[in-house]
Image (cartoon, rainbow, N blue to C red):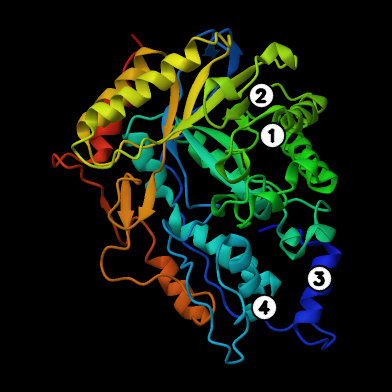
Amino acid sequence: MKRGIGCAAAALLLLLCGGCGQTPEKPPVSEPPQEEPKEEHTLSFLTAKGTSLKNEEGETVTLRGVNAGGLCVTEGWMTGISSEGRAPGDGTPGGDVRVRDQLTATKVLIERFGLSTAEDLWYNYRGYWWTEEDFENCAEMGINVIRLPFTFMNVDFAAVQGLDYAGFEYDFSYLDDFVSRAEQHGLYTILDLHGAYGSQNGQEHSGETIDDEKDVDFYSNEEKLFLTEKLWGEIADHFKENPAVAGYDLLNEPGEKAGLTSARHFDAMDRFYHAIRAKGDEHVVIFESCWAGEDIPLPQEYGWKNCMYSFHHYTNCTGQDRVFEHCNSFSERVKEVEMRHFGVPLYMGEFTCYDSEAQWDYTLDLLNTHGWSWTSWTYKVWGDMSWGIYNVGLNGERKVNVHTDPLDTIEEKFRALSTAENGVWHTLGTGKTLFFEIRKYAAKETK
């Protein structure tokens, strides 16, 4: 596996081993087993033509699928990494750090085990969280796309030490592997930058939690903007010939602390858009609104071409007694967006309908009927929750405590995250699995 941590990272590793003058022996880290897929598929480039996506054969393609949440971006509530566990001031490495997000978890792992082993641990985590069986499950669900959230840390690991270490060398090997294996199962991948350098929104799902909205300075910080612009240029240069990538989702939920988007957010995204196009990359570029149609400009205001607009919508109607409220909320959101006549394909990038089969039926039929692409949040979660189509962590397993768990215990807990080892399909209130509910609508023709 290519590491690409750079000279600055190597210097940090030397510092962490106490200035001993040599790299310490790395603790053993097992490689998660991966099976080869049984058959291959060939996908063709997608292009936005008016309000539709077209493949190279001129056929309309509506993307219907899931998010791969929790894979490259770990959130404590939904994955096997605990967000608790501040060590009690007893001299334990990282004892003064509460694991609030992926960045702080990584820093604790580096302090305990060294830079290279920390990177290997995340590699192994991903290998267990998402296996060949998960690609097979997605294919059997009848979907045709997976949205892959990732952060700068997944491709520029040295940058976890700080921005001074960022942007020198990139490692796209995991993204390459995911896109390739998805394609072998007939699945497109949307590359979604869920966490930019320094965090574009200050929320845990960006990989870095920032408490106060005023401290989220991404859109006024030229260094963070430049590094993110450079990253998108490098991604484009790397993937521009790859038809299995359906598109680039520039920034997940760009408003600070879930706030609304405005011109300064789209000015930043315009920079990223041009960084992609400067590399000769003609993939579909996806712009996100937080949260409504009124919060995103017409594409002609910026001169954007070959783009798609994405919206996220969560109604919080979690019970069986608010079905009308949920359905009306989705209907109004679709209506409000469409009345603005953006002239581009529309995409519901994140949503869930909780445990109500009636809500799932209405929402998926609504999106299909209106020709929207969609990806539900999400494929897999820790715990018995309708946020995930597949649930793990139901048999008394404990989450990883990065402060105190020994290396072999961390590896053992990672293995328990594997779909093959542990877990069940989530069951809705009616007794139907969410797997079959998604499959019911994934392959339906747009009316």
Q: In this view of the protein, which residue sits in the foreground, 258 or 207?
A: 258
State the residue position of label 3: 10
Q: Is residue 341 above or below residue 6?
A: above
- Tag 2 and tag 3, C-beta contact below 8 Å: no
Give the mark nearer the N terminus: 2 vs 4: 4
For numbered disc 1, what is the local secondary structure? helix
Question: Which label sits on residue 375?
Answer: none
Please tell me which residue is depicted at 81% across the width and 79% down the height of the picture.
14
Viewer-nearest of labels 1 and 4?
Answer: 4
Disc 3 to disc 1, how far (Cα)?
A: 28 Å
For numbered disc 4, what is the local secondary structure? helix
Question: Which label sits on residue 111?
Answer: 4
- Tag 2 and tag 4, C-beta contact below 8 Å: no
Please tell me which residue is depicted at 29% across the width and 25% down the height of the picture.
327
Disc 2 to disc 1, how far (Cα)?
A: 9 Å
Question: Which label sits on residue 283?
Answer: 2
Give the mark nearer the N terminus: 2 vs 1: 1
Q: In this view of the protein, which residue sits in the foreground, 417 or 286?
A: 286
Within 10 Å of disc 4 (Cα), the crowding (few <14, some 14-19, many 20+) is some
Three-letter amino acid code at the position of disc 2: His
- Tag 2 and tag 1, C-beta contact below 8 Å: yes
State the residue position of label 1: 239
- Tag 4 and tag 3, C-beta contact below 8 Å: no
Within 10 Å of disc 2 (Cα), the crowding (few <14, some 14-19, many 20+) is many
Within 10 Å of disc 1 (Cα), the crowding (few <14, some 14-19, many 20+) is some
- Tag 1 and tag 4, C-beta contact below 8 Å: no
Give the mark nearer the N terminus: 1 vs 4: 4
